[in-house]
Amino acid sequence: MSKIQPEALRGVAFQIILESGDARSVIHEAFILMRESKFSEAEAKLELAKDAIIKAHSAQADLLQKYASGINFDTDILIIHAQDHLMASQTLKEVALEMLYLHRKVAE
């Protein structure tokens, strides 16, 4: 049975962390724009965050596909951290979309 080498696994983990971290940073920029009632700009930031999360999710999905096809790897703390990072960014994006809706409602 084949195995993903630790270096390759770390590369995937860092890719997930990088993309989801970028998403999180942009989401926080969107929060600032929401407070300033710059809703279109905030929405554009959330689109950028969505794109970064899609890239992170793609790296994760590739890893899962390899695993499903019988390619194993040793789980380490870095890949667990990467998964946690991605989930947190996805959740934050969902909260930000709700907040954008609420900010718009209050501004009406």
Image (spheres, grey):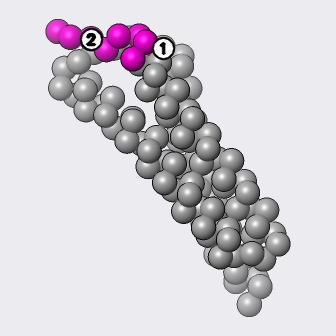
Q: Nearer the viewer, residue 91 or 55?
A: 55
Front residue of 55 and 95 = 55
Rendered position, 30 above or below 87: below
Asked if residue 60 can be seen in this view, the reply is yes
Label annotation for residue 76: 1
Quadrant of the image occupied by residue 103? bottom right
Q: CA distance from mark 1 to mark 2?
A: 14 Å
User: How far across and down, in percent of the image, does residue 24 sit?
Assistant: 64, 47
Callout 1 secondary element: loop
The residue positioned farthest toward the bottom in the image shown = 108
- Say if 105 sits above or below 54 in the image: below
Callout 1 crowding tier (Cα within 10 Å): few <14, some 14–19, many ≥20: few
Q: Mark 1 or mark 2: which comes first in sequence?
A: 2
- Residue at the image position 53 percent from the left and 19 percent from the top: 78
Kind of residue at disc 1: Asp
Assess whether residue 107 is covered by the magenta stretch: no
Name the magenta segment's main secondary structure. Answer: loop
Q: Which residues are magenta?
A: 1-8
Residue 83 visible in the snapshot:
no
